[in-house]
Amino acid sequence: MLQLQTIRNNKDEVIAKLTKKNFKNAEAVINSVVELDEERRTKKTELEGLLAEGNTLAKQIGELIRNGKKEEADSLKTRSTEIKEKSKQFEERFNQIDEEVLQLLLTIPNTPHESVPAGKTPEENEEVFSEGVIPKLDESALPHWELTSKYDIIDFELGNKITGAGFPVYKGKGARLQRALINFFLDEALKAGYYEIMPPNVVNADSGFGTGQLPDKEGQMYHVTVDDLYLIPTAEVPITNLYREVILKEEELPVKNAGYTPCFRREAGSYGAHVRGLNRLHQFDKVEIVQLVHPDNSYRVLDEMVEHVKGLLRKLELPYRILRLCGGDMSFASALTYDFEVFSAAQQRWLEVSSTSNFETFQANRMKCRFKGKDGKNQLVHTLNGSALALPRIVAALLENNQTPEGIRLPEVLHAYTGFKMIN
């Protein structure tokens, strides 16, 4: 959530940035926030004047009563009663303004970083890096949903039977490959200095609010209505919320956590061939890296997180590219996002496997997560996170890109984790 002080002091800049993010009615919404804020501050000054007058009257009334001047005291009491009633009206209006401002702030996305390109669609994202050789497969090459059936490692129909579409069953070497990738990603995170967390897979509404998933504007979260809990769409939510309403010491920064969880997304409105097989699931596994850092360091840390994900894809021997997302394709809470995509040779298309983002103070402000600086003042931290990595499309690319007449060759880095070199 944007800080009210930021909006107040930089109104025109905020409007310009929100316009770049294609936030509709940016000027009208920001102007409403500023007008309500100005009304509150004006009325607060008036209230302070009334309260000062009330205190003066109270002293005068007490003095008059002590001197036996009851009639004069009674005349002042009338004014004192008027002040109390008006003060009550001010307080009621303050509460109303606070609620109106909050509801407006909840509709406002984070402002994009200056490096974010303008644009409205994914086609306008900016490619900033690419690496690896795209494999050339022969005409007999199969997409992963046929390979998984051929080698009996993932069963989509069985998952559909016991749950529904988007909930596959991993079997045999398919299950072992999942476990191998999870352990590989976690081990790499630990080598990079992250602290492993195994959080709950359901969260309360306060946690969803803290990281910006709630209010759920796109209906993507599974809601357990009886208990008012939510299945997590990403480990970002519980891991970041470990620090909700926490004041850290400056020397404790950066906080670096990593965790594996299943993730649940309704993916409402997702249909068609482009979401077939593992391309888009309702339940999938992911290792997430999360950092809480000093504001001065957050963009350097973002670059470090990008390098970490690069290293994973290099070791998996997958061709990939990095996109800097344009304003219209960014998430509600992000200030800058880099998407990683791997090339799927059998499908002849790029598949997103990671989003690595800096949220600056947007999440911290919602969570009230701060640190005490050396000057003794509390400041909001910057929060960052990234997929390192999401498994489904990694598996899809590994299966498709590495298929041979003898079977599916796995990259060397996974051999010690899987216990086998080929799926056949």
Image (cartoon, rainbow, N blue to C red):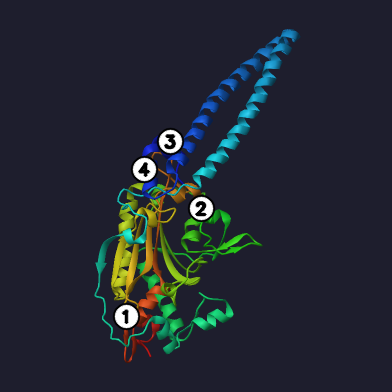
Distance Cα–Cα, label 3 vs label 2: 22 Å
Q: Nearer the viewer, residue 280 or 366?
A: 280
Instruction: Give the residue pinned by disc 1.
Output: 401
In the displayed structure image, the side of residue 105 where residue 114 appears, left or right:
left
Residue 370, placed above or below residue 122? above
Q: Secondary structure at mark 2?
A: helix
Q: Which mark is residue 8?
A: 3
Find out whether the residues at labels 4 and 2 contact each other: C-beta distance under 8 Å. Answer: no
Residue drawn at (52%, 76%) of the image: 167
| Amino acid type, mark 4 | Ala
Q: Which mark is residue 16?
A: 4
Indicate the position of residue 354 as horizontal and vertical percent values: 38, 66
In which quarter of the view is residue 185 placed? bottom left
Find out whether the residues at labels 4 and 1 contact each other: C-beta distance under 8 Å. Answer: no
Tell which tag, 1 or 2, sits nearer the viewer: 1
How would you rate the neighbour count of disc 1 (Cα within 10 Å): few for under 14, some for 14-19, many for 20 or more?
many
How would you rate the neighbour count of disc 4 (Cα within 10 Å): few for under 14, some for 14-19, many for 20 or more?
some
